[in-house]
Amino acid sequence: MQKNLVAFLLLLSLAGPLAAKAPNVICIISDDQGWADIGYNNPKAYSPNLDKLAAGGATFSKHYVMPQCTPTRVAFFTGRYPGRFSRNALAASNAPVFPKGTFNLAHLFKSRGYQTAIMGKWHMGSDPKHGPNHHGFDYSYGSLPGAVGNYDHRYRKDWHLHSWHRNHEPLPNNEDGTHTTDLVSRDAIRYIREKPSKPFFLYLPFHAVHTPLDERGKFTDRPTQLDPDKPGRWLDEDDIPWFHDPKGIIQSEKDPEKRLFLAALNHLDHAIGEIVSALDETGQRENTLILFSSDNGPQVSWGGNAYPDDLKLTDFNQPDTLRGSKCDTWEGGIHVPGFANWPGKIKPGTQIDENVHIIDWLPTLATLTGAEVPEEHPLDGLDLSGLLFKGETTLPERDLYWIWNTATNKWALRFGDWKIVKTGKGEPKLEEWQLFNLKDDPSEKKNLAKKHPEKLQELHARFLKQRAKDKRG
Protein backbone atom coordinates (compact mmCIF):
# COMPACT_ATOMS: atom_id res chain seq x y z
CA MET A 1 0.00 0.00 0.00
CA GLN A 2 2.79 2.41 0.94
CA LYS A 3 4.65 1.65 -2.30
CA ASN A 4 1.53 2.35 -4.35
CA LEU A 5 1.19 5.72 -2.60
CA VAL A 6 4.83 6.55 -3.35
CA ALA A 7 4.33 5.66 -6.99
CA PHE A 8 1.13 7.71 -7.19
CA LEU A 9 2.91 10.75 -5.71
CA LEU A 10 5.77 10.25 -8.17
CA LEU A 11 3.34 10.19 -11.08
CA LEU A 12 1.63 13.30 -9.76
CA SER A 13 4.99 15.09 -9.57
CA LEU A 14 5.77 14.03 -13.12
CA ALA A 15 2.39 15.09 -14.44
CA GLY A 16 2.45 18.48 -12.75
CA PRO A 17 -1.03 19.91 -12.19
CA LEU A 18 -2.68 17.17 -14.26
CA ALA A 19 -4.02 13.96 -12.80
CA ALA A 20 -1.51 11.13 -12.87
CA LYS A 21 -1.81 8.92 -15.92
CA ALA A 22 -0.05 5.58 -16.20
CA PRO A 23 2.66 5.91 -18.86
CA ASN A 24 3.19 3.56 -21.77
CA VAL A 25 6.58 1.87 -21.58
CA ILE A 26 8.65 0.68 -24.54
CA CYS A 27 11.83 -1.30 -23.87
CA ILE A 28 14.09 -1.64 -26.92
CA ILE A 29 17.02 -4.06 -26.89
CA SER A 30 19.36 -4.24 -29.86
CA ASP A 31 21.61 -7.24 -30.47
CA ASP A 32 25.44 -7.23 -30.41
CA GLN A 33 25.69 -3.43 -30.55
CA GLY A 34 28.93 -2.38 -28.88
CA TRP A 35 29.74 0.82 -27.01
CA ALA A 36 31.21 2.42 -30.15
CA ASP A 37 28.41 1.23 -32.45
CA ILE A 38 26.17 4.24 -31.85
CA GLY A 39 26.53 7.82 -32.99
CA TYR A 40 26.49 9.57 -29.64
CA ASN A 41 29.55 7.55 -28.60
CA ASN A 42 31.24 7.54 -32.00
CA PRO A 43 30.82 9.99 -34.90
CA LYS A 44 31.70 7.23 -37.39
CA ALA A 45 28.45 5.41 -36.54
CA TYR A 46 25.31 6.83 -38.15
CA SER A 47 22.29 6.54 -35.83
CA PRO A 48 20.46 9.90 -35.81
CA ASN A 49 17.19 8.62 -34.34
CA LEU A 50 18.88 6.84 -31.46
CA ASP A 51 21.12 9.86 -30.91
CA LYS A 52 18.09 12.18 -30.79
CA LEU A 53 16.37 9.99 -28.21
CA ALA A 54 19.53 9.83 -26.13
CA ALA A 55 20.08 13.60 -26.29
CA GLY A 56 16.44 14.21 -25.36
CA GLY A 57 16.67 12.11 -22.22
CA ALA A 58 19.19 10.52 -19.86
CA THR A 59 22.22 8.54 -21.01
CA PHE A 60 23.94 6.01 -18.77
CA SER A 61 27.71 6.41 -19.10
CA LYS A 62 28.38 3.21 -17.15
CA HIS A 63 25.59 0.95 -18.34
CA TYR A 64 26.12 -2.78 -17.93
CA VAL A 65 24.52 -5.96 -19.19
CA MET A 66 25.54 -9.62 -19.27
CA PRO A 67 28.09 -10.93 -21.79
CA GLN A 68 25.59 -12.60 -24.13
CA CYS A 69 21.99 -12.45 -25.32
CA THR A 70 20.02 -14.93 -23.21
CA PRO A 71 21.63 -13.93 -19.88
CA THR A 72 20.96 -10.24 -20.53
CA ARG A 73 17.33 -10.94 -21.41
CA VAL A 74 16.90 -12.91 -18.20
CA ALA A 75 18.46 -10.06 -16.17
CA PHE A 76 16.28 -7.47 -17.91
CA PHE A 77 13.10 -9.50 -17.58
CA THR A 78 13.48 -10.55 -13.94
CA GLY A 79 15.62 -7.88 -12.25
CA ARG A 80 17.89 -10.68 -11.09
CA TYR A 81 21.24 -12.10 -12.16
CA PRO A 82 20.73 -15.11 -14.45
CA GLY A 83 22.74 -17.41 -12.19
CA ARG A 84 19.88 -17.24 -9.71
CA PHE A 85 17.81 -19.46 -12.03
CA SER A 86 19.73 -22.14 -13.91
CA ARG A 87 22.78 -22.95 -15.97
CA ASN A 88 20.61 -22.53 -19.07
CA ALA A 89 20.32 -18.84 -18.20
CA LEU A 90 24.10 -18.27 -18.14
CA ALA A 91 24.70 -18.46 -21.91
CA ALA A 92 22.79 -18.39 -25.19
CA SER A 93 20.25 -21.19 -24.94
CA ASN A 94 17.14 -22.44 -26.64
CA ALA A 95 16.19 -24.34 -23.47
CA PRO A 96 13.83 -22.87 -20.85
CA VAL A 97 15.73 -20.54 -18.53
CA PHE A 98 13.28 -20.13 -15.66
CA PRO A 99 10.09 -21.91 -14.57
CA LYS A 100 6.66 -20.78 -15.61
CA GLY A 101 5.25 -18.47 -12.98
CA THR A 102 8.58 -16.73 -12.34
CA PHE A 103 7.81 -13.09 -11.61
CA ASN A 104 8.92 -10.78 -14.43
CA LEU A 105 8.31 -7.46 -16.12
CA ALA A 106 5.25 -8.67 -18.02
CA HIS A 107 3.66 -9.83 -14.76
CA LEU A 108 4.58 -6.52 -13.15
CA PHE A 109 2.75 -4.54 -15.82
CA LYS A 110 -0.22 -6.93 -15.93
CA SER A 111 -0.65 -6.42 -12.19
CA ARG A 112 -1.15 -2.71 -12.86
CA GLY A 113 -3.71 -3.16 -15.63
CA TYR A 114 -1.38 -2.83 -18.63
CA GLN A 115 -1.57 -4.57 -21.98
CA THR A 116 1.66 -6.44 -22.71
CA ALA A 117 3.22 -7.26 -26.06
CA ILE A 118 6.54 -8.43 -27.46
CA MET A 119 7.73 -8.15 -31.05
CA GLY A 120 11.15 -9.60 -31.87
CA LYS A 121 13.59 -12.12 -30.43
CA TRP A 122 12.44 -14.09 -27.36
CA HIS A 123 15.35 -16.55 -26.74
CA MET A 124 14.33 -17.53 -23.21
CA GLY A 125 12.82 -20.89 -24.12
CA SER A 126 12.48 -21.57 -27.85
CA ASP A 127 9.82 -24.26 -27.69
CA PRO A 128 6.31 -22.75 -27.94
CA LYS A 129 5.53 -24.45 -24.60
CA HIS A 130 7.89 -21.92 -23.01
CA GLY A 131 7.15 -18.92 -25.21
CA PRO A 132 6.33 -15.38 -24.08
CA ASN A 133 2.56 -15.91 -23.84
CA HIS A 134 3.26 -18.31 -20.97
CA HIS A 135 5.17 -15.57 -19.12
CA GLY A 136 2.70 -12.71 -18.96
CA PHE A 137 2.46 -11.39 -22.53
CA ASP A 138 -0.96 -10.84 -24.07
CA TYR A 139 0.54 -10.80 -27.55
CA SER A 140 3.77 -12.04 -29.11
CA TYR A 141 5.30 -11.90 -32.56
CA GLY A 142 8.77 -12.68 -33.92
CA SER A 143 11.25 -15.49 -33.39
CA LEU A 144 11.20 -17.88 -30.45
CA PRO A 145 14.86 -18.95 -30.76
CA GLY A 146 17.86 -16.65 -30.92
CA ALA A 147 19.36 -14.93 -33.93
CA VAL A 148 17.71 -15.97 -37.19
CA GLY A 149 18.37 -15.32 -40.84
CA ASN A 150 17.22 -11.83 -41.69
CA TYR A 151 15.23 -12.97 -44.73
CA ASP A 152 14.52 -16.67 -44.09
CA HIS A 153 13.84 -16.26 -40.33
CA ARG A 154 15.20 -19.66 -39.34
CA TYR A 155 17.60 -20.34 -36.51
CA ARG A 156 20.76 -21.75 -38.09
CA LYS A 157 20.77 -24.40 -40.77
CA ASP A 158 19.58 -27.35 -38.68
CA TRP A 159 16.62 -25.65 -36.99
CA HIS A 160 13.66 -27.67 -38.24
CA LEU A 161 10.82 -25.92 -36.45
CA HIS A 162 9.16 -22.80 -37.78
CA SER A 163 10.77 -20.09 -35.72
CA TRP A 164 8.73 -17.04 -36.80
CA HIS A 165 5.41 -16.95 -34.99
CA ARG A 166 2.44 -14.97 -33.81
CA ASN A 167 1.25 -16.02 -30.36
CA HIS A 168 3.30 -19.22 -30.71
CA GLU A 169 1.61 -20.20 -33.96
CA PRO A 170 3.80 -20.60 -37.08
CA LEU A 171 3.06 -18.06 -39.78
CA PRO A 172 2.45 -18.92 -43.44
CA ASN A 173 5.76 -19.23 -45.31
CA ASN A 174 7.53 -18.15 -42.11
CA GLU A 175 7.09 -14.55 -43.35
CA ASP A 176 10.20 -15.17 -45.47
CA GLY A 177 11.48 -12.51 -47.82
CA THR A 178 11.12 -9.50 -45.52
CA HIS A 179 13.94 -8.30 -43.27
CA THR A 180 13.52 -9.03 -39.55
CA THR A 181 14.03 -5.35 -38.70
CA ASP A 182 11.09 -4.41 -40.94
CA LEU A 183 8.83 -7.17 -39.64
CA VAL A 184 9.40 -6.20 -36.01
CA SER A 185 9.01 -2.46 -36.57
CA ARG A 186 5.93 -2.83 -38.79
CA ASP A 187 4.13 -4.92 -36.20
CA ALA A 188 5.09 -2.49 -33.43
CA ILE A 189 3.81 0.43 -35.51
CA ARG A 190 0.55 -1.41 -36.20
CA TYR A 191 0.13 -2.00 -32.47
CA ILE A 192 0.81 1.65 -31.63
CA ARG A 193 -1.54 2.97 -34.30
CA GLU A 194 -4.36 0.81 -33.00
CA LYS A 195 -4.08 2.92 -29.79
CA PRO A 196 -4.62 0.25 -27.12
CA SER A 197 -7.43 1.03 -24.72
CA LYS A 198 -5.13 0.49 -21.75
CA PRO A 199 -1.59 1.70 -21.09
CA PHE A 200 0.84 -0.71 -22.72
CA PHE A 201 4.19 -2.35 -22.09
CA LEU A 202 5.86 -3.01 -25.43
CA TYR A 203 9.07 -5.06 -25.47
CA LEU A 204 11.03 -4.76 -28.73
CA PRO A 205 14.09 -7.04 -28.80
CA PHE A 206 15.40 -6.48 -32.34
CA HIS A 207 17.58 -9.05 -34.11
CA ALA A 208 19.83 -6.34 -35.56
CA VAL A 209 22.77 -5.89 -35.56
CA HIS A 210 23.50 -9.58 -34.93
CA THR A 211 24.96 -11.74 -37.70
CA PRO A 212 24.17 -12.90 -40.29
CA LEU A 213 24.49 -9.38 -41.71
CA ASP A 214 22.31 -9.26 -44.81
CA GLU A 215 21.05 -5.96 -46.26
CA ARG A 216 19.42 -6.44 -49.67
CA GLY A 217 17.21 -3.40 -50.10
CA LYS A 218 14.82 -4.07 -52.98
CA PHE A 219 16.92 -7.03 -54.16
CA THR A 220 15.23 -9.42 -51.74
CA ASP A 221 15.87 -12.58 -53.78
CA ARG A 222 19.63 -12.08 -53.83
CA PRO A 223 21.78 -12.58 -50.73
CA THR A 224 24.24 -9.84 -49.84
CA GLN A 225 27.52 -10.47 -51.68
CA LEU A 226 30.57 -8.61 -52.87
CA ASP A 227 30.49 -7.22 -56.41
CA PRO A 228 32.83 -9.31 -58.60
CA ASP A 229 33.43 -6.29 -60.83
CA LYS A 230 34.06 -3.74 -58.07
CA PRO A 231 36.53 -4.87 -55.41
CA GLY A 232 35.56 -3.66 -51.95
CA ARG A 233 31.94 -2.94 -52.96
CA TRP A 234 28.77 -4.91 -52.34
CA LEU A 235 26.65 -5.94 -55.31
CA ASP A 236 24.22 -3.09 -56.12
CA GLU A 237 25.39 -1.23 -53.02
CA ASP A 238 24.67 2.08 -54.73
CA ASP A 239 20.99 1.15 -54.96
CA ILE A 240 20.49 -0.16 -51.42
CA PRO A 241 19.40 2.76 -49.20
CA TRP A 242 20.88 1.46 -45.94
CA PHE A 243 24.41 1.93 -47.30
CA HIS A 244 23.84 5.67 -47.60
CA ASP A 245 23.16 8.62 -45.31
CA PRO A 246 22.88 12.38 -45.91
CA LYS A 247 26.26 13.05 -44.28
CA GLY A 248 28.08 10.36 -46.24
CA ILE A 249 29.33 8.72 -43.05
CA ILE A 250 28.65 5.16 -44.16
CA GLN A 251 30.16 5.61 -47.61
CA SER A 252 33.29 7.18 -46.11
CA GLU A 253 34.05 3.83 -44.44
CA LYS A 254 36.54 2.04 -46.72
CA ASP A 255 36.25 -1.41 -45.16
CA PRO A 256 33.28 -3.15 -46.86
CA GLU A 257 32.54 -5.34 -43.85
CA LYS A 258 32.41 -2.37 -41.51
CA ARG A 259 30.25 -0.62 -44.09
CA LEU A 260 27.85 -3.57 -44.12
CA PHE A 261 27.55 -3.37 -40.35
CA LEU A 262 26.90 0.37 -40.53
CA ALA A 263 24.18 -0.31 -43.10
CA ALA A 264 22.50 -2.76 -40.70
CA LEU A 265 22.74 -0.14 -37.94
CA ASN A 266 21.26 2.51 -40.24
CA HIS A 267 18.36 0.14 -41.00
CA LEU A 268 17.74 -0.47 -37.29
CA ASP A 269 17.96 3.22 -36.47
CA HIS A 270 15.47 4.08 -39.22
CA ALA A 271 13.02 1.48 -37.88
CA ILE A 272 13.23 2.94 -34.37
CA GLY A 273 12.65 6.40 -35.83
CA GLU A 274 9.48 5.13 -37.54
CA ILE A 275 8.23 3.71 -34.23
CA VAL A 276 8.76 7.06 -32.50
CA SER A 277 6.97 8.80 -35.39
CA ALA A 278 3.99 6.48 -34.90
CA LEU A 279 3.84 7.54 -31.24
CA ASP A 280 3.93 11.20 -32.32
CA GLU A 281 1.25 10.75 -34.97
CA THR A 282 -1.13 9.03 -32.57
CA GLY A 283 -0.63 11.51 -29.74
CA GLN A 284 0.99 8.96 -27.44
CA ARG A 285 4.60 10.20 -27.41
CA GLU A 286 4.30 12.54 -24.42
CA ASN A 287 3.07 9.72 -22.22
CA THR A 288 5.57 7.06 -23.31
CA LEU A 289 8.81 6.17 -21.56
CA ILE A 290 11.40 4.60 -23.89
CA LEU A 291 14.30 2.57 -22.50
CA PHE A 292 17.12 1.40 -24.77
CA SER A 293 20.05 -0.97 -24.38
CA SER A 294 22.15 -3.40 -26.34
CA ASP A 295 22.23 -6.98 -25.04
CA ASN A 296 26.03 -7.34 -25.01
CA GLY A 297 29.21 -6.06 -26.60
CA PRO A 298 30.24 -6.38 -30.26
CA GLN A 299 30.63 -9.69 -32.09
CA VAL A 300 33.75 -8.28 -33.87
CA SER A 301 34.35 -11.35 -36.08
CA TRP A 302 32.13 -14.15 -37.33
CA GLY A 303 33.06 -17.43 -39.02
CA GLY A 304 29.96 -17.52 -41.23
CA ASN A 305 28.23 -20.56 -42.71
CA ALA A 306 26.02 -21.11 -39.64
CA TYR A 307 22.94 -19.91 -41.52
CA PRO A 308 21.97 -19.93 -45.17
CA ASP A 309 23.53 -16.88 -46.86
CA ASP A 310 25.81 -16.33 -43.86
CA LEU A 311 28.95 -14.31 -44.62
CA LYS A 312 32.31 -14.76 -42.94
CA LEU A 313 33.20 -11.37 -41.45
CA THR A 314 36.34 -10.10 -39.75
CA ASP A 315 36.68 -7.09 -37.46
CA PHE A 316 33.40 -5.60 -38.70
CA ASN A 317 32.32 -3.55 -35.66
CA GLN A 318 33.51 -0.02 -35.00
CA PRO A 319 36.86 0.16 -33.15
CA ASP A 320 36.64 0.62 -29.39
CA THR A 321 39.05 1.33 -26.56
CA LEU A 322 37.32 -1.15 -24.24
CA ARG A 323 38.98 -4.51 -23.79
CA GLY A 324 37.16 -7.61 -24.99
CA SER A 325 33.93 -8.26 -26.87
CA LYS A 326 30.78 -10.37 -26.79
CA CYS A 327 31.01 -13.32 -24.38
CA ASP A 328 33.73 -11.59 -22.34
CA THR A 329 33.43 -10.21 -18.84
CA TRP A 330 35.96 -7.57 -19.83
CA GLU A 331 34.37 -4.13 -20.28
CA GLY A 332 34.00 -4.58 -24.04
CA GLY A 333 31.62 -7.50 -23.53
CA ILE A 334 29.36 -5.96 -20.87
CA HIS A 335 29.61 -2.13 -21.04
CA VAL A 336 27.09 -1.00 -23.68
CA PRO A 337 24.99 2.00 -24.76
CA GLY A 338 21.89 2.67 -22.68
CA PHE A 339 19.46 5.56 -22.23
CA ALA A 340 15.98 6.58 -21.08
CA ASN A 341 13.71 9.08 -22.83
CA TRP A 342 10.37 10.53 -21.67
CA PRO A 343 9.48 14.01 -22.99
CA GLY A 344 8.74 16.48 -20.23
CA LYS A 345 9.58 13.96 -17.49
CA ILE A 346 13.30 13.28 -18.00
CA LYS A 347 15.45 16.36 -18.47
CA PRO A 348 17.16 16.41 -21.90
CA GLY A 349 20.93 16.09 -21.81
CA THR A 350 21.01 14.29 -18.47
CA GLN A 351 24.07 12.08 -18.04
CA ILE A 352 24.01 9.49 -15.29
CA ASP A 353 27.51 8.48 -14.24
CA GLU A 354 26.62 5.90 -11.59
CA ASN A 355 27.24 2.20 -12.22
CA VAL A 356 23.90 0.91 -13.51
CA HIS A 357 22.84 -2.46 -14.88
CA ILE A 358 19.90 -3.75 -16.86
CA ILE A 359 18.78 -5.57 -13.68
CA ASP A 360 17.82 -2.08 -12.46
CA TRP A 361 15.07 -1.63 -15.05
CA LEU A 362 12.52 -3.85 -13.27
CA PRO A 363 12.74 -2.21 -9.83
CA THR A 364 12.66 1.22 -11.49
CA LEU A 365 9.51 0.35 -13.41
CA ALA A 366 7.98 -1.21 -10.31
CA THR A 367 8.33 2.11 -8.48
CA LEU A 368 7.03 4.07 -11.46
CA THR A 369 3.89 1.95 -11.79
CA GLY A 370 3.35 1.15 -8.12
CA ALA A 371 3.66 -2.58 -8.73
CA GLU A 372 4.45 -4.91 -5.87
CA VAL A 373 7.38 -7.32 -6.26
CA PRO A 374 6.74 -10.62 -4.44
CA GLU A 375 8.92 -11.29 -1.41
CA GLU A 376 9.89 -14.66 -2.88
CA HIS A 377 11.46 -12.80 -5.84
CA PRO A 378 14.40 -10.93 -4.23
CA LEU A 379 15.73 -8.35 -6.68
CA ASP A 380 19.39 -7.77 -7.48
CA GLY A 381 18.71 -4.44 -9.17
CA LEU A 382 18.26 -0.96 -7.74
CA ASP A 383 15.54 1.62 -8.34
CA LEU A 384 16.83 4.34 -10.71
CA SER A 385 13.76 6.56 -10.55
CA GLY A 386 15.52 9.09 -8.28
CA LEU A 387 18.28 9.51 -10.86
CA LEU A 388 15.85 9.75 -13.77
CA PHE A 389 13.03 11.85 -12.37
CA LYS A 390 14.14 13.64 -9.20
CA GLY A 391 17.62 14.94 -9.99
CA GLU A 392 19.45 12.60 -7.64
CA THR A 393 23.05 11.88 -8.58
CA THR A 394 24.13 8.88 -6.51
CA LEU A 395 23.12 5.30 -5.84
CA PRO A 396 23.95 3.11 -2.85
CA GLU A 397 27.23 1.26 -3.35
CA ARG A 398 26.60 -2.27 -4.53
CA ASP A 399 28.22 -5.17 -6.34
CA LEU A 400 27.82 -5.74 -10.06
CA TYR A 401 28.40 -9.40 -10.75
CA TRP A 402 28.96 -11.52 -13.84
CA ILE A 403 29.23 -15.17 -14.77
CA TRP A 404 29.22 -16.35 -18.35
CA ASN A 405 28.85 -19.97 -19.38
CA THR A 406 29.88 -22.47 -16.72
CA ALA A 407 31.61 -24.56 -19.41
CA THR A 408 33.94 -21.76 -20.51
CA ASN A 409 33.85 -19.87 -17.22
CA LYS A 410 34.30 -16.12 -17.39
CA TRP A 411 33.77 -14.24 -14.15
CA ALA A 412 33.85 -10.65 -12.88
CA LEU A 413 32.67 -8.37 -10.10
CA ARG A 414 32.70 -4.58 -9.92
CA PHE A 415 32.41 -2.55 -6.72
CA GLY A 416 32.84 1.20 -7.05
CA ASP A 417 35.80 1.88 -9.34
CA TRP A 418 37.36 -1.55 -8.72
CA LYS A 419 36.83 -4.70 -10.74
CA ILE A 420 38.10 -8.28 -10.61
CA VAL A 421 38.16 -10.55 -13.68
CA LYS A 422 38.95 -14.22 -14.18
CA THR A 423 38.84 -16.31 -17.35
CA GLY A 424 39.20 -20.06 -17.01
CA LYS A 425 37.47 -23.17 -15.79
CA GLY A 426 36.74 -23.70 -12.13
CA GLU A 427 35.38 -21.50 -9.37
CA PRO A 428 37.69 -18.48 -8.97
CA LYS A 429 40.33 -18.64 -6.26
CA LEU A 430 41.74 -15.53 -4.64
CA GLU A 431 45.08 -15.75 -6.43
CA GLU A 432 43.45 -16.26 -9.86
CA TRP A 433 41.77 -12.86 -10.10
CA GLN A 434 43.09 -9.86 -11.99
CA LEU A 435 42.32 -6.50 -10.39
CA PHE A 436 41.70 -3.20 -12.15
CA ASN A 437 40.81 0.36 -11.20
CA LEU A 438 38.38 1.38 -13.94
CA LYS A 439 38.48 5.07 -13.07
CA ASP A 440 42.20 5.21 -13.84
CA ASP A 441 42.33 2.34 -16.32
CA PRO A 442 39.03 1.92 -18.23
CA SER A 443 40.77 -0.26 -20.83
CA GLU A 444 41.81 -2.80 -18.17
CA LYS A 445 45.49 -2.84 -19.07
CA LYS A 446 47.10 -2.70 -15.60
CA ASN A 447 46.60 -5.69 -13.32
CA LEU A 448 46.88 -4.32 -9.76
CA ALA A 449 46.31 -7.60 -7.91
CA LYS A 450 49.80 -7.73 -6.41
CA LYS A 451 49.87 -4.00 -5.65
CA HIS A 452 46.53 -3.97 -3.79
CA PRO A 453 46.06 -7.39 -2.10
CA GLU A 454 43.64 -5.95 0.45
CA LYS A 455 41.32 -4.66 -2.30
CA LEU A 456 41.59 -7.99 -4.11
CA GLN A 457 40.58 -9.83 -0.95
CA GLU A 458 37.64 -7.48 -0.38
CA LEU A 459 36.25 -8.00 -3.88
CA HIS A 460 36.82 -11.75 -3.72
CA ALA A 461 34.77 -11.88 -0.52
CA ARG A 462 32.02 -9.90 -2.24
CA PHE A 463 32.12 -12.32 -5.17
CA LEU A 464 31.69 -15.30 -2.87
CA LYS A 465 28.61 -13.71 -1.29
CA GLN A 466 27.05 -13.20 -4.71
CA ARG A 467 28.00 -16.67 -5.90
CA ALA A 468 26.36 -18.20 -2.82
CA LYS A 469 22.99 -16.83 -4.04
CA ASP A 470 23.19 -18.70 -7.37
CA LYS A 471 21.38 -21.90 -8.21
CA ARG A 472 23.94 -24.62 -8.90
CA GLY A 473 23.55 -27.42 -11.38
Image (cartoon, rainbow, N blue to C red):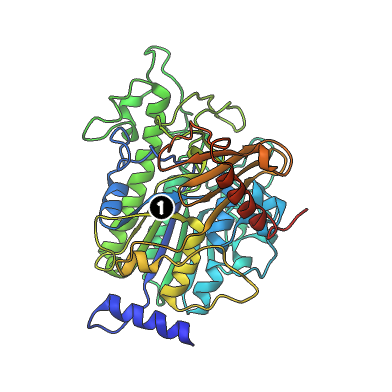
Left or right: 201 as drawn, with respect to 379? left
Residue with the mark numbered 1: 185
Q: Position of residue 378 (x, y in %)?
A: 61, 69
Q: Residue at x 50, y 25 (%)?
A: 313
Residue 3 in view of the camera? yes
Q: Position of residue 350 (x, y in %)?
A: 28, 57
Along the line of sight, which residue is nearer the eye, 30 or 212? 30
Residue at the farthest right position: 473
Relative to 183, say whether 107 is above or below.
below
Q: Residue at x 66, y 37 (%)?
A: 432
Q: Residue at x 29, y 64 (%)?
A: 346
Left or right: 334 as drawn, with respect to 24? right
What type is the residue that disc 1 sits on? Ser
Left or right: 267 as drawn, with respect to 74? left
Q: Position of residue 342 (x, y in %)?
A: 30, 64
Q: Quick one: SS at disc 1?
A: helix
Residue 193 in view of the camera? no
Q: Position of residue 70 (x, y in %)?
A: 60, 50
Q: Quadrant of residue 316?
A: top left
Number of other residues with Cα within 10 Å of mark 1, as a class: few under 14, some 14 to 19, many 20 or more: many
Along the line of sight, which residue is nearer the eye, 326 or 150? 326
Q: How many numbered marks are there?
A: 1
Q: Quadrant of residue 318?
A: top left
Left or right: 49 as drawn, with respect to 138? left
